[in-house]
Image: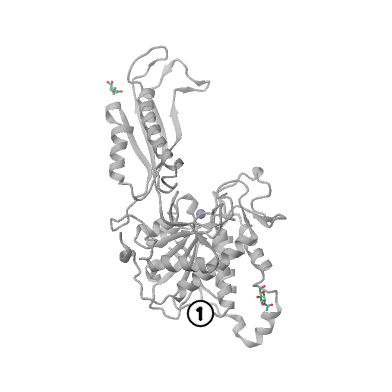
Amino acid sequence: MKIVNSKHFFHLCFLSFLFFTCKASQNQSSSSSIISRFQEYLQINTAHPNPRYYEAADFILSQAESLSLESQTIEFVENKPLVLLKWPGKDPKLPAVLLSSHTDVVPVESHKWTHPPFAAHIDSDGNIYARGSQDMKSVGMQYLEAIRKLKDSGFEPTRTIYLSYVPDEEIGGRDGAEKLVESDVFQKMNVAFVLDEGMPSADDKYRAYYADRSPMWLVIKATGAPGHGARLYDNTAMENLLKSIESIRRFRASEFDMLKAGLKTTGEVISVNLVFLKSGTQTPAGFVMNLQPSEAEAGIDIRVPPTVDQDAFERRIAEEWAPASRNMTYEFKEKFSTLDIFGKPAVTIADSSNPWWVLLEEAVLNAGGKLEKPDIFRGATDASFFRQRGFPAVGFSPIANTPGLAHDHNEFLNQQEYLKGIEIYAAIIKAFASYAEQTESKASKYEL
Ligand SMILES: *[C@@H]1O[C@H](CO)[C@@H](O)[C@H](O)[C@H]1NC(C)=O
Ligand SMILES: *[C@@H]1O[C@H](CO)[C@@H](O)[C@H](O)[C@H]1NC(C)=O
Ligand SMILES: [Zn+2]
């Protein structure tokens, strides 16, 4: 780990002789300035595989400087800077709140976009087109704009607010959020609650997530006797694998039926999707047609909600989907536990027994937003790393009335929706920063 720089800035405008200059310069709080800053962040190409992390870090640091926030750049992994900002509270004994965001975005197929994905073009309807406009440069900048608003209004936090701008969420987060949560730096931050990204909603209600589904990326492999393509015989690798696939498909259909019938949400079902099939005997001329191969394998992306008993589920895999009796083996390419380090489901309580949830819900409503019943996120976000270690974390992005286009072509966010999101965050951050109860810094209090 390398601390690249650490600064404590002073608010220039406090100096009276500069006051006039500050006032006379362009109004930093006007809507057009707010939108320009968002565009500037979107224009930094932080797409994998070569994200411009230093440009993004420099940009965030310049924003922090203009807001007189304390800042620190940390490289837990070389060339993957993580920016940590601090808005110190008046009572340093109170555990802090962390506003988490990632700076990276997924790659684009530029030619399939209507507007260039890193131009942040605004069309006549006020839609801002850019990779990251939903996932999640919007959120990262909205945190800062909300703080600018609160500072403009003279608000001072009682409780410390931290903001993290981490790399690598889109490629698993191991070198980003996970390194942060495992660090001494994080220990010292004394964090009580984490806010991270959620998902846009097409209707007028925001979504909030109290858990993530855990990935179990499974590869099953069958072996069998090779033989002539014209011969009918038992126990071929293909037949062995296909029996498993039939069983997997029946399971998939039963889960999908519950989703279609509205009995469960996307986050509550187990999703099972075949992502590759691999077999055959290949020569430079192509596949050999008259030979039954001796090996066949399949890759399956499985996501399980935290209610699933993963041991029991793995037994099902061993017995039905990859039985040794059918000459099959299996391995997990990735497997996240649904339990935290204390052996409890990695879930944040999202009801009246968790004061952070109550504050969040009230703040959203008070700022004129609507909130859907909290749900389980369909994929894994950085919030998982915090919940894994027992820290309560909620995933929330104030994006309503917007088609979900994260990772899709033509990702966009409307200016008005973006500005409204800033008001929502201002209300949330104000509520969190004013909350003066001596909360515990771990989730232990809110155990299931
Ligand atoms: C800057 O713009 C904001 C929002 O439009 C407004 O409330 C504020 O009064 C303006 N400040 C100055 C110094 O013009
Ligand atoms: C498993 O492999 C063994 C050894 O190759 C073979 O004798 C047996 O028939 C196979 N069984 C199945 C179900 O494929
Ligand atoms: Zn994201």
198 lies left or right of 239: right
Residue 199 drawn above or below residue 63: above
442 lies left or right of 367: left
Amino acid of disc 1:
Glu
In the picture as drawn, the residue positioned furthest to the top comes out as 230
49 lies left or right of 22: left
Which image quadrant for residue 272? top left
Circle 1 crowding by C-alpha within 10 Å: few under 14, some 14–19, many from 20: some
Q: Nearer the viewer, residue 366 or 167?
A: 366
> In the image, residue 289 lies at what x, y percent?
47, 17
Residue 428 drawn above or below residue 132: below
Residue drawn at x 44%, y 76% as measured from the top left:
159
Dividing the image into four quarters, tell me where ligand 2 lies.
top left
Looking at the image, can residue 185 be seen? no
Looking at the image, can residue 316 be seen? yes
437 lies left or right of 116: left
Residue 249 drawn above or below residue 267: above
Q: Nearer the viewer, residue 189 or 394?
A: 394
> In the image, residue 400 lies at what x, y percent?
56, 57
> How many marks on residues?
1
User: In the rendered image, which quarter contains the C terminus?
Assistant: bottom left
User: In the rendered image, which quarter contains the N terminus?
Assistant: bottom left
Secondary structure of the residue carrying tag 1 is loop
Residue drawn at x 35%, y 56% as measured from the top left:
346
> In the image, residue 254 lies at what x, y percent?
39, 37
> In the image, residue 129 lies at what x, y percent?
65, 53
Q: Which residue lies under the disc numbered 1?
A: 156
